[in-house]
Image (cartoon, rainbow, N blue to C red):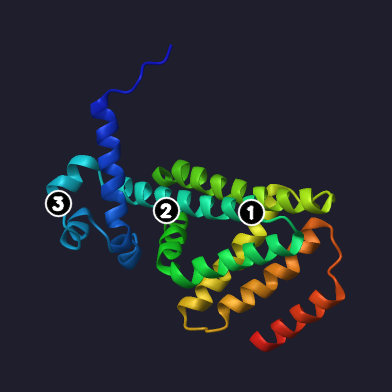
Amino acid sequence: MATAPRPRDHKFDERRAELGEAALQTLATLGYARTSLREIAQNSEFSHGVLHYYFTDKLDLILCSVRQYKARCVKRYDEVTATATTFDELLDGFAAALGDTLRNEASLHRLWYDLRAQSLFEEAFRADVAEIDKSLEKMIWRVMSRFAEITGEPLRVSSGVAYAMFDGLFQQALLKHLSGDKKAVATMQANVRLVVPQLAGVPLPVKRRNATARSRLNTA
């Protein structure tokens, strides 16, 4: 039978989570390459010694911070799927959530993509990055599965393909947004509205098809 964690272990994990959350904005601003535990300490209320006690190195801290942030993102989309009762309501909520997080939390998403890119070169990153990536894929699949429940139509792609498509649209929009493109969010949302019906096996209504076409022209 599994042994319950000791109170000290629980408090230790809680403190790590608190420190990871406090360091998140500094990490997002500086990025992986320019960040060290000492620099994080200089930009927070915590000493270098405290950070070093709770985290073995900056990778340990970054993974803790990003994992917590992405877990919040997953819950945000789960709320959309839980409250939507129609196809259009779910599509509107999904597109709005993507737009809001891109607009308001661009630096945090940049940190995630920075970390994911580093995992191509550093093997120590890969297991944790793969775990976070899988949680995001499952989140997208829950959204798409909800579309299928509402329409009664089977999805036309696998979870991996669906995630790759939305992740690609999001990363492309993030790059444009960070480069100063004021239409990046609207363009991404228009593309999402175009892609979802195709993946869900639902013909795009003429009204929505015309509106999507106008949106794409206006954001081009």
The residue indicated by pointer 2 is: 69
Q: Is residue 20 left or right of residue 205?
A: left
The residue indicated by pointer 1 is: 83
Q: Residue at x 49, y 73 (%)?
A: 103
Location of residue 81 in the rendering, given as x and y in whole percent from the top left corner: 64, 52
Q: Is residue 36 left or right of residue 123?
A: left
Mark 3 surroundings: few (<14), some (14-19) or many (≥20) residues within 10 A:
some
Counting the numbered discs, the total is: 3
- Image height check: is 174 above or below 166? below
Please tell me whether mark 1 or mark 2 is closer to you in this view: 1
For mark 2, give the secondary structure: helix
Please tell me whether mark 1 or mark 3 is closer to you in this view: 1
As measured in the structure, the alpha-carbon distance from the residue carrying label 2 to the one carrying label 3 is 22 Å
Which residue appears farthest toward the top when viewing the image? Answer: 1
Location of residue 153 in the rendering, given as x and y in whole percent from the top left corner: 85, 51
- Image height check: is 43 above or below 142? below
Q: Residue at x 43, y 61 (%)?
A: 114
The answer to whether mark 2 and mark 3 are in CB contact below 8 A is no
- Image height check: is 50 above or below 44? above
As measured in the structure, the alpha-carbon distance from the residue carrying label 1 to the one carrying label 2 is 22 Å
The residue indicated by pointer 3 is: 48
Mark 2 or mark 3: whose residue is earlier in sequence: 3
Name the residue type under label 3.
His
The answer to whether mark 1 and mark 3 are in CB contact below 8 A is no
Q: Residue at x 13, y 52 (%)?
A: 47
Point out the image quarter for the N terminus: top left
